[in-house]
Image: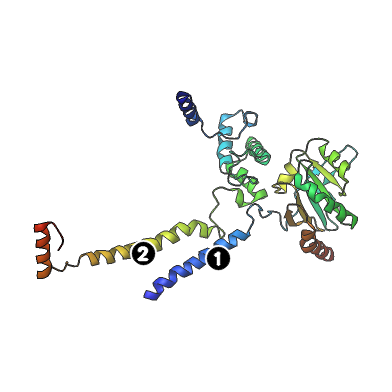
């Protein structure tokens, strides 16, 4: 009984410390996506210029692709951009969602830096982004051959994120469909 | 100078918290606007996460405020508006999370702390109460003499 009075606080302390320690390792700014394993929301967006075909939810399906949320005002997108061009050169299909941008700003931004996107949808009011649960740019969604969201990456795609997460996932999804 | 400082201090006291809702965002119907304000105060901004969208100046919070007002104008109930936002951003956006499997520990934590703590306190107070009831042992003859000496001379021997 006496010994128990000493052991219980120690056990409680260790439990609380473990719970708080796990909490330290999580990034609370990254919210779980509500869309995982669910079909992408329906949308039909115009392109950045009148000649662009734009992007609609019906453009997805057939093979797994990436949907990258970007904007000309987004600083981290500048960092991510060379990586996207590199992926495009490797044959990865990336669709773009120009989120909450001024008219013309997205087109200028891509004209300066090169266009890594197969299709681009312009979302000046940000509603399609909100339907996807976007909290900021850049964000990248992995969308499978059935048009379902399989993964969401918050922040720029770094070589590490590509090699460890996105590439293995795309390869797996390609064999799936 | 002192008077100016005092004046400025008093002016500061008058400054209350100001919501981020811009005049052009507000609905013409005061009843709907009041409902929109109430809903927005319960929804967390996903950019600056410890503010409600009613307080936040983030552009995304402004968009969500606009969506809340659009849904209300379209005839949605308060619950439907909440469900619309939760469908996109998850239960995380509710500043009052619902009681479910994931939040059971969160909601029961006060009881989990209060009950063992209260029991411990009761046990401790009972034990101390019993210890306090013990009669003090009377002074020995020697102690009594020493005490009398101290009282007489006002000095310890």
Q: For the residues carrying marks 2 and 1, which lies nearer the camera in this image?
A: 1
Res A46 seen here: no
Q: Toward the viewer: A166 or A113?
A: A113
> How many labels sit on residues?
2
Res A6 → quadrant: bottom left
Q: Which chain carries label 1?
A: A
Real-space Cα distance between discs 2 and 1? 24 Å
Question: Where in the figure is residue B94, as x and y percent of width and height?
Answer: 58, 48
Residue at 67%, 49% (x, y): give it: B88
User: What is the number of the mark on residue B120?
Assistant: 2
Give the answer, above or below, for where A5 lies relative to B109: below
Q: Name the residue under label 1.
A: A18
Is residue B122 at least partly visible in the picture? yes
Badge 1 element: helix
Q: Mark 2 lies on which chain?
A: B
Position in image of residue A174 (x %, y %)? 84, 63
Q: How crowded is mark 2: few (under 14 residues within 10 Å), some or many (20 or more)?
A: few
- Report the front residue among A15 and B42: A15
Give the secondary structure at mark 2.
helix
> Residue A172: horizontal and vertical position, in percent?
81, 65
> Residue B22, located in which quarter of the rendered image?
top right
- In this rendering, would B47 be left or right of A46? left
At a point 10% along the width and 62% down the height, the residue shown is B149
């Amino acid at each position: 009984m006496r010994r128990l009075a000493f052991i219980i606080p120690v056990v409680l302390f260790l439990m609380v410390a473990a719970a708080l320690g796990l909490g330290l390792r999580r990034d609370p700014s990254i919210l779980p996506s509500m869309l995982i394993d669910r079909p992408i929301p329906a949308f039909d967006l115009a392109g950045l210029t009148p000649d662009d075909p734009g992007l609609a939810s019906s453009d997805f399906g057939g093979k797994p692709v990436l949907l990258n949320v970007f904007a000309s005002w987004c600083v981290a997108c500048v960092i991510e951009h060379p990586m996207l061009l590199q992926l495009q050169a490797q044959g990865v299909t990336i669709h773009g969602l120009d989120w909450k941008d001024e008219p013309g700003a997205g087109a200028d931004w891509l004209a300066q830096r090169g266009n890594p996107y197969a299709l681009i949808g312009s979302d000046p009011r940000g509603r399609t982004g909100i339907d996807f649960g976007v909290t900021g740019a850049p964000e990248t969604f992995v969308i499978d051959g059935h048009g379902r969201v399989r993964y969401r990456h918050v922040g720029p795609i770094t070589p590490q994120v590509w090699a460890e997460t996105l590439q293995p996932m795309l390869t797996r999804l390609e064999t799936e469909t | 100078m002192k008077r100016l400082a005092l004046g400025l201090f008093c002016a500061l006291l008058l400054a209350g918290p100001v919501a981020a809702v811009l005049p052009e965002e507000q609905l013409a119907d005061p009843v709907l606007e009041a409902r929109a304000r109430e809903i927005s105060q319960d929804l967390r901004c996903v950019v600056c996460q410890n503010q409600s969208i009613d307080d936040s100046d983030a552009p995304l919070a402004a968009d969500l405020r606009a969506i809340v007002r659009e849904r209300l104008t379209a005839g949605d109930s308060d619950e439907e508006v909440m469900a619309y936002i939760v469908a996109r951003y998850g239960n995380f956006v509710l500043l009052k999370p619902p009681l479910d499997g994931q939040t059971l520990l969160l909601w029961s934590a006060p009881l989990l702390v209060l009950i063992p703590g209260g029991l411990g306190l009761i046990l401790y107070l009972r034990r101390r109460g019993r210890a306090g009831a013990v009669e003090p042992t009377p002074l020995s003859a020697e102690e009594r003499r020493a005490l009398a000496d101290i009282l007489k001379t006002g000095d310890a021997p």
